[in-house]
Amino acid sequence: MAATSLQPHERECAVCTNEFTTPKILPCGHLLCRECVISWMDSKADASCPLCRCPIVQPTAQVDRSSTDVADALPTDFVTEALLESARVLAKDHICCGCADVTAGFICMQCLDMMCQSCCMIHRKFSATCSHDVESVRTVTPERLAASRPALCADHGDKHAEIVCVDHGLAVCASCTVTRHRKCKAVRELQTEMTSSKSTIAILTCMIDNAELNLEEAIAKLDSRLQEVGDNEQNDMAQVDIHCQRLHHVVDDFCNTLKERTHESHSQLRKSLRDAKNVLAEQQVKVTSHKRMLTRATTVAPRPGLIFATKALTDRVNYLDINVKLAGDVLRNPSTNAGFCESVVRRIEKELHGIIDPRAKSQVKHFLLLFDDNGGGGCVVIVDDDDDEANRKPTILLKIKMKSKEFNSLIICDSSSKIFNIH
């Protein structure tokens, strides 16, 4: 019962904050009154759901329709409408319909009349009402009341409906079938349509359950991946620190650049994972909203509201995107700088040991390390000892290939502590 009962916030429209009047199902699964949909769309150029900000009109839909046409095109939640109507009946003063100023302790589930003990006994004796279900007003619920109410003819409110005219979307009595609806092509028995609607609701519920399970698993997987990315980022940052310590006197700026790049790559992956999680979470909100409507429809099954609600819910569930897709890039680990650092350190150490010898010292004034700001490349260079410092040109001894082709010049010299910017 807890799954189908309407909570206080589920009875109120998010726009007018009153109980729903002709509740319309938005594409996201939330509900708004028909008149509120119209006023909300008229007040905003690009109106979206006030609860989740999903668009009321899809971008691919026609944009020249009026707000009234859009509201009328949205399916009506007949189940919620039946529940609210039953709740309003039970909220009335419990006064016996036959005895003035006498507290009623019972209610007829078919007539909706409240009665005292004496009137209840008489009600059960009349031939016209002896088959009716009479229950205590203290124990009956809106769901039980809505499910027990008979289907009445749309044209003759006092006659029981036995036929459903699909062409007009009405439940009618047998006499109406041979008079007003004799030319209608789709005229079917009410009980047959109820059975078919319940079967369809069961199938839709299964689809939504599977979709919800898949979404939960996918979101859990993304949560796990987010944790792994955080752990990997810490490990990579530690490795970057370890390798950069070997060159911290000469490549301190390069070490900071690697840290920023490592953080950026993990941040980009984290953003992709969060974006994917948000998309799936939005799907989950829609799926959960529709699941609650399907659950209520299954439990309550008001006549003939279930029949009309089934078509609307079928269209809505078929319209939902319940496929869970995770792009391959969010499941891949980010590129790490640890191996790159190790390779650079070994190569630079090797080349520096080969450069520093007695014969080269007399000809070389400065040993320089050059790295691209964007990680695009780097090289080890020497600057000849020249009296005209403005005419000094570096001699490239070792090239280090990176991703970018453009150098933005960061040169750190050795013992002279001079910094040269070479473009």
Image: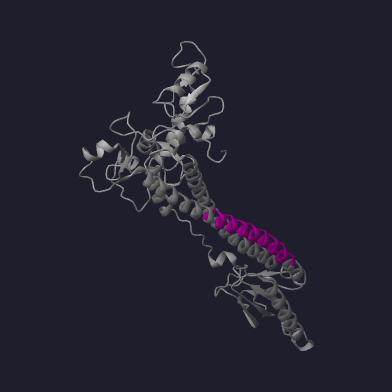
Q: Position of residue 195 (x, y in %)?
A: 41, 47
Residue 247 image-quadrant placement:
bottom right
Give yes or no for residue 225 being in the magenta stretch. Answer: yes
Quarter of the N terminus within the rendering: top right
Specify whether 324 is left or right of 350: left
Q: Residue at x 37, y 51 (%)?
A: 59
From what the image shows, is residue 237 above or below residue 368?
above
Q: Residue 314: where, in percent of width, then height?
A: 40, 50
In this view, 168 is above or below 392: above
Residue furthest bottom in the image: 359
Q: Is residue 46 visible?
A: no
Depth order, front residue of 342/181? 181
Q: Main secondary structure of the magenta part?
A: helix
132 left or right, relative to 105: left
**In the picture shown, does residue 58 fall above or below 35?**
below
**In-front residue for pair 339/80:** 80
Q: Residue at x 48, y 32 (%)?
A: 145
The quadrant of the rendering that contains the C terminus is bottom right
Question: Based on the displayed image, in which of its 4 quarters is residue 365 positioned?
Answer: bottom right
**Coloration mode:** one colour
Taking 422 as reference, is 167 above or below it?
A: above
- Relative image position of residue 104 (x, y in whole percent): 51, 18
Q: Is residue 370 visible?
A: yes
- Residue 222 percent location from the top left of the image: 61, 59
Residue at 76% from the left image edge and 89% from the top image edge? 359
Please give the range of residues in magenta.
Answer: 211-238
State yes or no: residue 340 in magenta: no
